[in-house]
Image: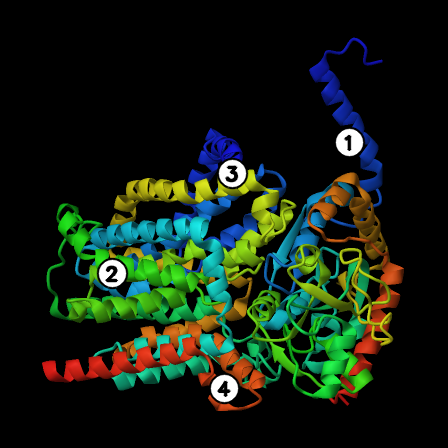
């Protein structure tokens, strides 16, 4: 082991590789911050580069993009309320509220620290616990996955205090939207109303960006317009605003006390993210939402969640970033790509002539050790570089909305189009925006809708696979101890918390 | 003649000479403009089609002239890519790289405004051989075991495959209609999910393509039962074909570059020539071997024969199972 470790050290810490990692992080953070664009997309576009670079340099670049993108998504989630990547949808809930209260920098710093903590932990788990954890992950079949999805839906829908019915309704609406398109099991078309372009269903990015971002943009624009109308009518004197409004950067610094207060949420997110990331097919957005839900339940300030709580930001961000190391576990242990990112890393390995799977570490020990080292130190580069960039990004967030909104709007449309090269996606984006406006006006929570939309395809597949395997017997869903455990925990949590909440009233 | 020229100048001179040498093959005859060529794939990035197309995009510009981009459009279950190529100008710059699913199968089962005759193959990269596999500690380890178990208790064996009627599902349908056996079909989100369900013991059998399981089969971590092909797969030399076991079920999946039929014949011929030349170059061969793509280029004429045969056989299968009339 040691004899290949030394060359791996040289490989990983050569100036060229460090430079590529830094370039990757910078690209990832910036692209992730643009709504609709994600690190995955950049990796997909840059895949052919591995034909021309040394393996360590290529892997360094891809790793940098991945990690940067993972955090970058939270920048636009916090700054504009627009999740830059699907993983950061949960970050937007509290992050954007924090920004509206005038402390975007605190929220961004919290996101950065929790992201790096979650990511680093997950990388160590990948390096030292890949095989045992992968074997546990394989015990998750359709029955267990359905229980996990049901658990997460219950958790999030019931989160919206005082409006549980609205939460459940929104989750149901999300599931309904996700059912548009081709039936994943039978292949027949559902709810497409004869529109051929809907055969592939609604894509995640336009729905996500539309519901969260475009709706916000429309509301802001109409507010600005209303203000203008009232101003003209009242003929009040116009205040000479600076470009940045009245944002005071000196008051917006994350204190050590505040940082320490978010640690519990960060560790909840890290644990859940690492575990869920190792499950093939579960994904970073699910991890973020479950972490957020659990952190709220176990926080002593649960009431603050949804109103700009830094703990909420920390849990969501640690949750999605902690999937980044562990999502590679099934790839390394069995050659199974557990997520879109893992599939792209798998393709990169194949393009370099390395077959993903258990033999990978024996056949290409040096490169894989170098990758492990890169995975770890890329977090530090991410931390340093992002810390340097954030003051600029958080100032961008405070630019007056009449300047910022059109830019964000254009970026959202461009990013959505670029993600799938599809004009239909842009229409979906705009319609989702209008739906979002209606829902916001009537005070419906948006997070359950998004979670329902994200979880539904997997949940439906898991349910129908379980029923196929169990020959139509619903009791088959209870034939696994893991599933029974998940249902029990969900039931206990919902019972206790509804009772506790009742008493408090 | 170059004796007195210093090394650097000599290099430049050689380069110029080389360019002049290539120029006639490009310049005069090329029906292409300087705009980039687009290879549109109806799947997400990172899969077999993407990787194979990238071997071509990395090597062919030298032979064809313009730059070559690989564009991934997985929207509307791949039909968006098909429509994009269909609606592009018929100048040979926009081409589809696909297996038979989005063209042949979709042409039958989906509501599309084109027919199979509106397309013409430019060339074929390779033939993928659908392979049935399982985990090594499963009681079913051979084709005979499978048939015996399915006859003993019909409809008891769970079989995982990617999207219904796709290239790793239709062979199972064909096998069942040839033998009368019944299995429980469990659609999955793709090869990765099929494999984790098999390795985790949640389902019995699954279907995939040889390249994705070859190293695991060699290491004894997965067992390949049989290949739905006329001959054994080079990646899995020890795995019998179903024909060897006495079941004449052969349904390989090609990966073709396809143009619309209104692209002029000389353009198609030019593309065929420069693509085949590029794929025969040492760089392309080395790349193909490195990524296990198994590229064995087939020219436009032979590809067209194969295409038409596939259109007919897929049509028969779909009529047989009542998918179309």
Disc 4 to disc 1, C-alpha distance: 69 Å
Disc 2 to disc 1, C-alpha distance: 63 Å
Chain name for mark 1: B
Q: Could you tell me residue A143's position as x and y percent? A: 48, 79
User: In terms of depth relative to the viewer, which is nearer, A340 or B267?
Assistant: A340
Q: Are marks 4 and 1 on the same chain?
A: no
- Name the disc covering residue A265, or none: 2
**Which residue, given by chain and number where applicable, does mark 4 sit on?**
A476
Q: Could you tell me residue B320's position as x and y percent? A: 79, 87
Q: Nearer the viewer, mark 1 or mark 3?
A: 3
* Quarter of the image where one finds residue A289: bottom left
> Sequence order check: which comes first, mark 2 or mark 3?
3
Chain name for mark 3: A
- Name the disc covering residue B309, or none: none
Q: Nearer the viewer, mark 2 or mark 3?
A: 3
**Which residue, given by chain and number where applicable, does mark 3 sit on?**
A1
> Sequence order check: which comes first, mark 4 or mark 2?
2
**Which residue, given by chain and number where applicable, does mark 1 sit on?**
B19
């Amino acid at each position: 082991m040691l004899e290949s470790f030394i060359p791996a050290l040289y490989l990983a810490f050569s100036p060229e590789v460090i430079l590529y990692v830094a370039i990757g992080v910078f690209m990832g953070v910036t692209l992730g911050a643009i709504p609709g664009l994600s690190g995955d997309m950049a990796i997909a576009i840059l895949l052919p580069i591995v034909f021309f670079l040394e393996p360590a340099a290529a892997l360094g670049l891809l790793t940098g993009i991945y990690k940067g993108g993972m955090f970058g998504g939270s920048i636009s989630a916090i700054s504009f309320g627009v999740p830059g990547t699907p993983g950061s949808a949960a970050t937007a809930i509290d992050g954007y509220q924090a920004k509206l209260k005038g402390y975007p920098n605190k929220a961004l710093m919290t996101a950065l620290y929790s992201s790096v903590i979650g990511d680093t932990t997950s990388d160590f788990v990948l390096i030292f616990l890949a095989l045992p954890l992968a074997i546990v992950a394989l015990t998750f079949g359709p029955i267990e996955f359905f229980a996990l999805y049901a658990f997460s839906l219950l958790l999030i829908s019931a989160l919206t205090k005082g409006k549980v019915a609205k939460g459940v309704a929104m989750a149901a609406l999300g599931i309904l939207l996700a059912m548009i398109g081709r039936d994943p099991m039978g292949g027949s078309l559902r709810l497409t109303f004869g529109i051929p372009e809907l055969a592939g269903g609604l894509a995640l990015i336009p729905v996500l960006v539309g519901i969260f971002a475009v709706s916000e943009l429309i509301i802001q624009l109409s507010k600005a317009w209303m203000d203008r109308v009232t101003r003209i009518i009242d003929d009040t004197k116009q205040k000479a605003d600076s470009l940045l409004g009245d944002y005071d950067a000196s008051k917006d610094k994350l204190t050590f006390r505040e940082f320490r207060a978010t640690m519990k949420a960060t560790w909840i997110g890290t644990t859940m993210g690492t575990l869920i990331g190792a499950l093939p097919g579960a994904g970073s957005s699910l991890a973020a939402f479950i972490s957020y839900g659990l952190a709220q339940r176990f926080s002593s300030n649960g009431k603050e969640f949804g109103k700009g709580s830094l703990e909420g930001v920390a849990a969501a961000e640690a949750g999605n970033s902690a999937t980044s190391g562990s999502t590679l576990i099934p790839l390394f242990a069995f050659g199974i790509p557990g997520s879109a990112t893992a599939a792209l890393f798998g393709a990169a390995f194949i393009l370099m002539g390395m077959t993903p799977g258990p033999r990978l570490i024996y056949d290409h020990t040096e490169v894989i050790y170098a990758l492990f080292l890169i995975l770890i130190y890329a977090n530090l580069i991410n931390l340093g570089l992002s810390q340097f960039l954030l003051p600029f990004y958080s100032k961008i967030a405070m630019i007056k909305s009449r300047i910022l909104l059109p830019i964000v709007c254009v970026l959202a449309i461009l990013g959505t189009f670029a993600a799938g090269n599809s004009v239909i996606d842009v229409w979906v984006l705009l319609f989702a925006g209008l739906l979002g406006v209606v829902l916001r006006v009537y005070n419906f929570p948006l997070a359950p809708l998004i979670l329902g939309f994200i979880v539904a395809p997997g949940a439906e597949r898991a349910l129908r696979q379980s029923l196929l395997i169990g020959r139509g017997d619903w009791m088959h869903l209870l034939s696994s101890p893991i599933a029974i455990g998940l249902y029990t925990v969900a039931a206990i949590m919902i019972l206790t918390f509804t009772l506790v909440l009742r008493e408090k009233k | 003649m170059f004796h007195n020229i210093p090394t650097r100048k000599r290099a430049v001179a050689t380069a110029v000479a080389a360019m002049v040498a290539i120029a006639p093959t490009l310049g005069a005859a090329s029906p292409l403009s300087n705009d980039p060529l687009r290879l549109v794939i109806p799947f997400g990035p990172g899969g077999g089609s993407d990787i194979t197309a990238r071997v071509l995009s990395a090597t062919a510009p030298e032979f064809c002239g313009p730059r070559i981009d690989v564009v991934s459009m997985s929207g509307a279950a791949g039909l968006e890519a098909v429509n994009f190529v269909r609606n592009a100008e018929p100048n040979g710059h926009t081409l589809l790289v696909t297996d038979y699913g989005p063209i042949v199968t979709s042409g039958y089962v989906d509501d599309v405004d084109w027919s199979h005759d509106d397309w013409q193959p430019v060339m074929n990269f390779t033939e993928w051989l659908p392979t049935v596999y399982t985990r090594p500690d499963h009681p079913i380890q051979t084709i005979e075991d499978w048939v015996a178990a399915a006859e003993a208790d019909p409809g008891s064996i769970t079989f995982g495959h990617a999207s219904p009627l796709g290239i790793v599902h239709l062979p199972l349908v064909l096998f069942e209609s040839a033998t009368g056996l019944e299995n429980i079909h469990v659609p999955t989100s793709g090869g990765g999910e099929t494999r984790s369900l098999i390795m985790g013991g949640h389902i019995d059998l699954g279907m995939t393509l040889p390249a994705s399981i070859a190293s695991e089969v060699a290491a004894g971590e997965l067992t390949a039962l049989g290949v739905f092909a006329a001959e054994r797969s080079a990646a899995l030399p020890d795995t019998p074909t179903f024909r060897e076991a006495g079941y004449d079920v052969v349904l390989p999946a090609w990966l073709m570059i396809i143009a619309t039929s209104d692209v002029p014949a000389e353009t198609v011929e030019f593309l065929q020539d420069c693509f085949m030349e590029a794929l025969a170059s040492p760089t392309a061969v080395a790349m193909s071997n490195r990524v296990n793509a198994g590229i064995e280029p087939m020219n436009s004429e032979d590809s067209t024969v194969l295409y038409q045969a596939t259109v007919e056989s897929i049509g028969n299968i779909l009529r047989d199972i009542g998918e179309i009339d």
